[in-house]
Amino acid sequence: MAKLLLLFLLGLVAIGTVHGIFMDKLASKKLCADEECVYTISLTRAQEDYNAPDCRFINVKKGQQIYVYSKLVKENEAGEFWAGSVYGDDDEDEMGTVGYFPRNLVEEQHVYQEATKEVPTTDIDFFCE
């Protein structure tokens, strides 16, 4: 009984500390440079402005550079999306903004590593705060 109560209380703490929503998955697999998808695959430049339709995506301005960390494996008639980070004009934006964007929005400027590792996506890949 004590274990059940402890698990319940831990669940309440977890629910109380997480503010966000799990969105629908855009794909079940992604291509990365490594198993954890932390290494940069490439540097791209946006060819046009893009307004994010929801919190899974990032807003991009034409000419902005985007560092790519994973490429979703296209399924059926879904669009082709990559995950990356963009940085604002201010130096305070050290972490950048991370999210998805359409592949046809960008032109690759430099490839650092090939995206050869196929990794399953998880719910956290599509979590929005």
Image (spheres, rainbow, N blue to C red):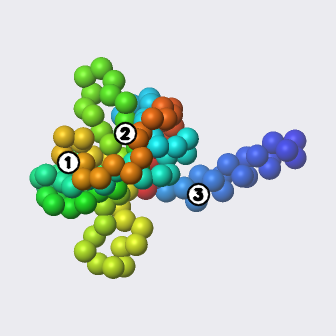
Observer-nearest residue: 109 or 29? 109
Q: Would you place residue 93 above or below residue 81 in this image?
A: below
Identity of the residue drawn at 28% across and 70% down: 88
Residue holding disc 1: 107
Mark 3 or mark 2, which has the lower sequence index?
Answer: 3
Disc nearest the viewer among 1 and 2? 1
Identity of the residue drawn at 13% across and 52% down: 47
Give me the disc on residue 10. Answer: none
Pinpoint residue 90: horizontal percent, then vertical percent: 29, 78
Type of amino acid at the residue the image marks with label 2: Lys
User: Visible in this render: residue 56?
Assistant: no
Residue holding disc 3: 16
Observer-nearest residue: 122 or 14? 122
Mark 1 or mark 2, which has the lower sequence index?
Answer: 2
Type of amino acid at the residue the image marks with label 1: Glu
Query: Label 3's element?
Result: helix
Type of amino acid at the residue the image marks with label 3: Gly
Pinpoint residue 65: horizontal percent, then vertical percent: 25, 60
Pinpoint residue 52: horizontal percent, then vertical percent: 23, 50
Observer-nearest residue: 55 or 90? 90
